[in-house]
Image: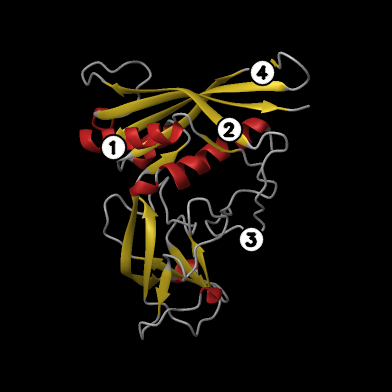
């Protein structure tokens, strides 16, 4: 995995699991329904039913999968995700896997039937690509992008100073929500830093939304943190009649929008 991808994953992890902690919601005792078409012998899938808007499982959201923001441990029934049987007893988390992206409980034993689930979920959708904004549609949405970078030698000695220019665009459903998200993100970037992880065995979640049991916490050798500087937040005013060329999405999504620009940098030893 190249450096830029590690930086992107580290920043995404920090924003989703640390910076946006104030925008985590909880649903209690939601019913679970059996999904026959997704199930097979040894894998019995149950989907959580939710009428929340935005949907907890829409793109860029999903269930919270860490016990604490700085944890490297998966959520369990001892945390905020709990699965209940027909007698309202908690089912041991050893009996099922959790699909955090699609909001599903997956059991290997057909004799255990889950009825309800309590979980926390990410209210703000966090995506990496502009094209994803159109696909999400349910506000609020935060888009992370690393736009420019270059590498410079140290003034003295070996190694390199590597700065990146990054942008975070916020799309909200109203002005108050926009301002709250913007200020929260600004405060978690201004004069702050995040861990620079190397993800030697992949990210915390596997391709199917379940916890990656091979996940290994490790920081990049010689550079344990990504530092943030020159953090600037602005409110974006978008004309609805004649949008600018870089705006390709509907004006109602753009109506309450802001942008945070900042430098992200670290020193790489040789």
Residue hosting label 2: 226
C-alpha gap between disc 4 and disc 2: 15 Å
Residue hosting label 4: 151
Residue hosting label 1: 180
Q: Nearer the viewer, mark 3 or mark 1?
A: 1
Q: Secondary structure at mark 3?
A: loop
Q: Secondary structure at mark 2?
A: strand
Of callouts 3 and 4, the N-terminal one: 4
C-alpha gap between disc 3 and disc 4: 35 Å
Identity of the residue drawn at 49% across and 61% down = 99
Identity of the residue drawn at 56% across and 75% down = 94
Find residue 250 and report its image quarter.
Answer: top left
Of callouts 2 and 3, the N-terminal one: 3
Question: Badges 3 and 4: C-beta atoms under 8 Å apart?
Answer: no
Which quadrant of the rendered structure holds the N terminus?
Answer: top right
Horizontal and vertical percent for residue 62? 42, 53
Q: Left or right: where does residue 10 sit relative to residue 254?
A: right
Which quadrant of the rendered structure holds the C terminus?
Answer: top right
Q: Left or right: where does residue 131 sit relative to residue 42?
A: left
Horizontal and vertical percent for residue 178? 28, 34
Q: Nearer the viewer, residue 191 or 245?
A: 191
Q: Secondary structure at mark 1?
A: helix
Disc ID at residue 213: 3
Horizontal and vertical percent for residue 197? 63, 42
C-alpha gap between disc 4 and disc 1: 35 Å
């Amino acid at each position: 995995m190249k450096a830029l991808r590690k930086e992107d994953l580290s920043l995404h992890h920090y924003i989703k699991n640390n910076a946006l902690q104030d925008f985590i919601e909880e649903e209690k005792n939601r019913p679970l329904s059996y999904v026959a078409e997704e199930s097979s012998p040894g894998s019995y899938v149950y989907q959580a039913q939710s009428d929340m808007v935005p949907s907890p499982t829409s793109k860029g959201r999903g269930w919270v999968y860490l016990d604490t923001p700085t944890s490297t441990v998966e959520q369990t029934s001892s945390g905020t995700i709990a699965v209940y049987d027909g007698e309202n007893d908690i089912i041991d988390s050893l009996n099922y896997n959790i699909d955090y992206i699609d909001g599903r409980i997956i059991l290997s034993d057909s004799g255990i039937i889950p009825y309800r689930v309590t979980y926390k979920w990410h209210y703000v959708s966090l995506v990496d690509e502009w094209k994803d904004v159109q696909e999400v549609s349910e506000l609020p949405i935060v888009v992370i992008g690393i736009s420019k970078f270059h590498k410079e030698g140290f003034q003295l000695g070996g190694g390199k100073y590597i700065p990146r220019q990054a942008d975070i665009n916020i799309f909200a459903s109203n002005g108050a929500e926009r301002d709250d998200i913007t200020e929260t993100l600004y405060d978690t970037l201004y004069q702050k830093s995040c861990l620079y992880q190397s993800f030697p065995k992949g990210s915390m979640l596997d391709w199917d939304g379940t916890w990656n049991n091979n996940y290994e916490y490790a920081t990049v050798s010689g550079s344990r943190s990504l530092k943030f500087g020159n953090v600037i937040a602005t409110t974006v005013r978008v004309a609805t009649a004649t949008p600018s060329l870089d705006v390709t999405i509907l004006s109602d999504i753009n109506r309450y929008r802001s942008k945070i620009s900042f430098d992200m940098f670290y020193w790489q030893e040789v």
